[in-house]
Structures are given as C-alpha cells and as structure tokens.
C-alpha cells in the first residue's frame, strides 16, 4: 500500500535497529504497552511472526510505515481482529518514531490502512483505544474522521497505575462519506 510519501509494508529484518531505537525512546513508548528494554531479539521475533500476516487475518498484525522514497522505517501500524463480512470490525494502533512525528506521515499511513480495511477488506467499523493524555494520537484520529466515543476512567492498568482509556471509532459509511 503506497501513498505520496509513505508505504505500508511488512516489517523486514533490516528494520530491526530502527524499530528498537524508537521503541526504546521514552517520548515514543510512554503511551505504549510494550516492556522495556525493547531488544533486537524481540524485534527479530516480531518481524518473523509478522512476515506472513495480513490485516485481514484475526489477531494482531503489525505493518511497517516506511518512507516511500528511501524505504526507511518511520513507525508501525497494528490491526487486531480484522475479518471481512457483515458486522466485522478491527482495532488499530500506531507508533511513530520521533523524527517522523509532526509531518503528516501518520495521517497518510492511517488513510492507507483505512482504505485497506474499509475498501478491500469491507469492514464495518474501526476503533482505537488511547490514553487521553496522548493529544497527538487523539488529533490524528479526529483528522481521519474518528469520533471520541467515550473515556473509561481508571480502567487500564499501565506501568503500575490505573489509567483512563479513551475510545475512538469510525464506521465505514462515515469514512466513505468523507471521501
């Protein structure tokens, strides 16, 4: 899947050092759930596990967000529960390396992913759970047409404390109407 500046593709072994670098960046991982340190071995295992997966399969699928001209890893998108058919839905997540933030690259990547999920895969609904303190992620979702469906207070145990959980959702008909 390719847009003007970005590509969504499978993670590759050569992505491992950059994946490890941004997953260990305190500004990047603070709203994420992986355990630190994020090692090269863990990156290698993730890349190997994701090699044959596609977003249309049940379970989590991780895709690389890469620069369309250099193929440099910029971040990753994750899809959980995607399956085609009436009433189907998927949860998404995303992580962007700090050097790629604030440039609209995640917006392009999210549009590619939504085109796959709503277009090719024919899903009914896509949703995301985020920490309400993660303003850039909330803004990304709203720009893409997601609506804030509510916040569950102190409902998520995260790094030793109860954290609020904000839910954002987008229906296929809403996404198609904004095109």
Image (spheres, grey):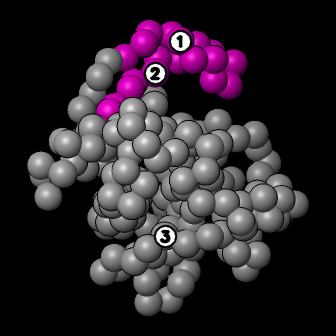
Q: Main secondary structure of the magenta part?
A: strand
The tally of labels here is 3
- The residue at the far right in this view is 41
Q: Position of residue 125 (x, y in %)?
A: 35, 37
Which residue has dot 2 on it?
165
Quarter of the image with the C terminus is: bottom left
Q: CA distance from mark 1 to mark 3?
A: 32 Å
Q: CA distance from mark 3 to mark 2?
A: 27 Å
Which residue has dot 3 on it?
8
For the residue labelled by badge 1, is the local secondary structure a helix, a strand or a loop?
A: strand
Quarter of the image with the N terminus is: bottom left
> In the drawing, does residue 15 fall left or right of residue 178?
right
User: Which of 107/55 is in front?
Assistant: 55
Marks 3/2 in contact by CB < 8 Å: the verdict is: no
Q: CA distance from mark 1 to mark 2?
A: 6 Å
Which portion, as a residue range, is magenta? 151-170
Q: Quadrant of residue 4?
A: bottom left
For the residue labelled by badge 2, is the local secondary structure a helix, a strand or a loop?
A: strand
Q: Position of residue 117 (x, y in %)?
A: 40, 53
> In the drawing, does residue 37 fall left or right of residue 125?
right
Which residue has dot 1 on it?
155
Q: Residue at x 63, y 17 (%)?
A: 157
For the residue labelled by badge 3, is the local secondary structure a helix, a strand or a loop?
A: strand
Above or below: residue 35 compared with residue 12: above
Queried whether the magenta region covers residue 163, the answer comes back as yes
Q: Residue at x 63, y 23 (%)?
A: 158
Nearer the camera: disc 3 or disc 2? 3
Classify mark 1: residues with Cα within 10 Å, few (<14), some (14-19) or many (20+).
few
Q: Position of residue 118 (x, y in %)?
A: 34, 52
- The residue at the far front in this view is 86
Queried whether the magenta region covers residue 124, the answer comes back as no
């Amino acid at each position: 899947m390719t847009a003007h500046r970005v590509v969504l593709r499978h993670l590759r072994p050569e992505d491992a050092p950059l994946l490890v670098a941004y997953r260990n960046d305190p500004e990047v991982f603070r709203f994420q759930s992986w355990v630190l340190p994020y090692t090269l071995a863990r990156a290698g295992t993730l890349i190997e596990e994701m090699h044959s997966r596609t977003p249309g399969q049940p379970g989590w699928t991780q895709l690389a967000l890469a620069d369309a001209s250099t193929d440099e890893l910029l971040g990753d998108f994750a899809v959980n529960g995607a399956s085609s058919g009436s009433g189907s839905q998927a949860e998404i997540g995303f992580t962007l390396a700090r050097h790629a933030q604030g440039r609209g690259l995640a917006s392009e990547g999210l549009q590619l992913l939504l085109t796959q999920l709503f277009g090719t895969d024919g899903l009914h609904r896509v949703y995301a759970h985020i920490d309400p303190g993660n303003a850039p992620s909330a803004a990304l979702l709203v720009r893409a047409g997601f609506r804030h469906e509510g916040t569950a207070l102190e409902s998520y145990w995260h790094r030793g404390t109860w954290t609020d959980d904000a839910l954002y959702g987008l229906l296929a008909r809403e996404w198609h109407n904004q095109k």
